[in-house]
Amino acid sequence: MKNSKIFVTQPSLPDLKELIPYLEKIWQSKIISNNGPFHEQLEIELSKYLNVPYISLVSNGTIGLIVALNALKVKGEVITTPYTFVATAHSLMWNKIKPIFVDIDPSTLNLDPKKIEAAITKDTTAIMPVHVYGNPCDVDTIETIAKRNGLKVIYDASHAFDVKCHCGSILKHGDLSVLSFHATKVFNTFEGGAIISHDKDMKTRIDQLKNFGFAGETSVQQFGINGKMNEFSSALGLLQLKKVNKDIEKRKKIDEAYRNYLKDIPGIRCHAYHNMEKGNYSYFAIFVDENYPLNRDQLYQKLKDNEIYGRRYFYPLVTDFQIYKDSGFFLDNDFPIAKRISSQVICLPIFSEMSIQNTKFISSIIANT
Ligand code: T4K
């Protein structure tokens, strides 16, 4: 039985004692930012761990998306999904790029590849899909479409740390992939993120862009930004990396328990994984339909009344925010699938330190209507 509030997530943290020696090193060296030794070490260790060629650490996932678009010189229009966190679309707006929203696939909840080509115009330069809840996008079809139409692909992989699909790391796909290391993610550095690239020149370009465009002490070659990860976050990342696999294993057990407890409740459907060789279990989404005695918001409130704080990721849809409606980029009735899913979803609490008893307790609240 639970005895305190349960939030949608709780950050995993290393033992504080383990952090002290790292802090002592920082205090001795006085190097706290600008590509310090922990930053360098974390890039090397992460690229080995994730089995990807090049990683550029950044201060958060949103800056990562903004820099990635800039690094690829993306302009004009970019095709993306309305079923995501606002940061995906905001990164386009910050680059003065027009987002062209395309509906999602009802089973994967990712950008529906079948609908991409109809949205391409002479101004389209890229596709920005999201691996929602860590569920891999249909990377092969997206790659074929991108090649056929000469488009870049930037994956918002904020939810997809260490996810593997049929051909290995999901992060190997696209021109660039962007991770978030926010407090609420499977792998956190308090705040942070990374851009995965596939060649040295692109990594150099990204590294310059995140450091004001500096190419050397007296040379600024691009209109860069400050997107650097600091030494504290980098040191923390090194410690987190030692235990992230165990954390994912623990999350997997929570995921399995939920599926077991919730499987026979009419009107409740658990999100299914597709083409996933290794998941990270970053979210546990359920969908409430008309066969359940309460509507989604009533169940959401009922859980809250029991101090269970799930979240409706992603409600409202990006395209339902007035600032996006006012943009005139799309018609109101353009995204029937995303709208339906957004009106049904609740992400239930899942984190590595969550107990199976609490999973059972939450499921029993959902079962007893
Ligand atoms: N693309 C996608 C697809 C994303 O999902 C995100 C971020 C991004 C891009 C951008 O990445 P970053 O720039 O953030 O690196 C959260 C997060 O702030 C956001 O990072 C995340 N997606 C989004 C899905 O969720 P909120 O407003 O729901 O978070 P908040 O503060 O309500 O936290 C949820 C719960 O987590 C709290 O009720 C308690 C717990 N929590 C949270 C924090 C921050 C803690 O226990 N400790 C903490 O420090 O947005």
Image (cartoon, rainbow, N blue to C red):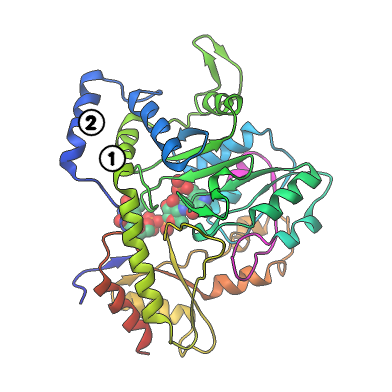
Q: Which quadrant of the figure has residue 257?
A: bottom left
Q: Position of residue 199 (x, y in %)?
A: 59, 29
Q: Please indicate whether residue 64 sits to the left or right of residue 262 in the image.
A: right
Q: Could you say which is closer to the camera, residue 323 or residue 116?
A: 116
Q: Kindly identify the residue that appears in the image at 72 percent across and 66 percent down.
A: 334
- 32 is higher (above) or lower (below) than 171: above
Give the residue drawn at x 36%, y 49%: 183
Q: Sequence-wise, which precedes: disc 1 or disc 2?
A: 2
* Residue named by callout 2: 22
Amino acid at pointer 1: Leu
Q: Position of residue 310 (x, y in %)?
A: 38, 69
Q: Whereabouts is ligand 1, in terms of quadrant?
A: bottom left
Q: In this image, 309 relative to 205: left or right?
A: left
Q: Residue at x 34, y 68 (%)?
A: 254
Q: Identify which amino acid the numbered label 2 is placed on.
A: Tyr
Q: Position of residue 297 (x, y in %)?
A: 46, 78
Q: Magenta region's main secondary structure?
A: loop
Q: Which mark is residue 198?
A: none
**Magenta span:** 91-112
Q: Residues within 10 Å of mark 1 (few under 14, many from 20)?
A: some
Outermost residue, front side: 167
Quadrant of the image containing the N terminus: bottom left
Residue of label 1: 239
Whole-angstrom CA distance, mark 1 to mark 2, is 9 Å
What residue is drawn where x is 59% and y is 65%? 109
Check disc 1 and report its element: helix, strand or loop: helix
Please, what secondary structure does the residue beneath circle 2 have? helix
